[in-house]
Amino acid sequence: MTQRAIRPSTLIVVLGIDGAGKSTAAEAVAGLLPGTPVLVLGNYSGRKTIAALAQRFRLPLPGQVADVLETTVRVFSVLLNHLRAARFDGVVIMDRHLYCQLALRKARGIRSRRLLEALLGVLPQAQAVVYFNIPAEQAHERIALRGEDQETLEDLQRFHKAYTELPWYPGFAVIDASGTTENSALQLQQIITAALPSSASLPQ
């Protein structure tokens, strides 16, 4: 008789600067957990879309305004995806989270973070928060090849520093994301396996 892999869902959050490969590794790890349902949910801020629309309509976009718009989109996405996760029986991998917006605000010198911190405190806690660690120079090379992002090397360096200064960072599981996607996915798979509840059963 085949049993469902995990009940209730196991929540994993993946974080990292752009170019760290977290989204690709999150999608790839599903193949490393045979018999275990995996749902990958993206908690995006709409930063690229907002910037593109502002440029298209030639509208000025002050930093504070951009942050309010991005934060609103991110919060809505996170809340919606937590509802989806609550209805899923398996491993839920959230690609980005409120930690990302907190790190962005810190990198931008925006001090108003209390509401986001309070919301983070009441949301269901992840079994593991995974930080994809990669040199900013290497990440910048990757996003330059994609040709979709506009972050400078300095932006990535500030973003990484802001992540490491978050009060939650010491509790993050940090992986080396400077290698191949396969290597990052294997490290993520090991963290997920260790985070599964002891009562989880795999198909027999």
Image: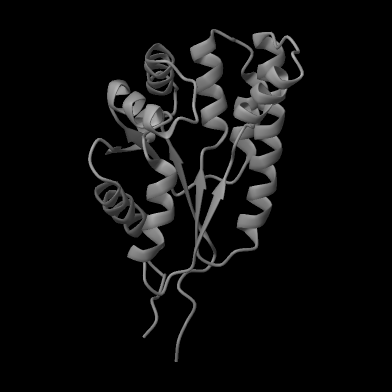
User: Percent x, y for residue 60?
Assistant: 73, 9
Q: Is residue 23 left or right of residue 48?
A: left
Q: Is residue 172 left or right of residue 138?
A: right
Q: From what the image shows, is residue 108 above or below residue 31?
A: above
Total numbered badges shown on the rendered structure: 0
User: Percent x, y for residue 133?
Assistant: 31, 32
Residue at image x 50%, y 65%? Answer: 90
- Quadrant location of the N terminus? bottom left
User: Percent x, y for residue 184?
Assistant: 29, 46
Quarter of the view holding residue 17: top left
Instruction: Tell which of 158 and 112 is nearer to you.
Output: 158
Q: From what the image shows, is residue 143 above or below residue 86?
A: above
Residue closest to the far bottom: 1
Regarding residue 36, the answer to whether it shows in the image is: yes
Q: From what the image shows, is residue 142 above or below residue 94?
A: above
- Quadrant location of the C terminus? bottom left
Regarding residue 196, the answer to whether it shows in the image is: no
Residue at image x 35%, y 36%? Answer: 132
User: Percent x, y for residue 200?
Assistant: 41, 70
Instruction: Tell which of 66 and 101 is nearer to you.
Output: 66
Q: From what the image shows, is residue 194 above or below residue 116?
A: below
Q: How is the image coloured?
A: one colour
Residue at image x 37%, y 49%? Answer: 25
Q: Is residue 122 left or right of residue 204?
A: right
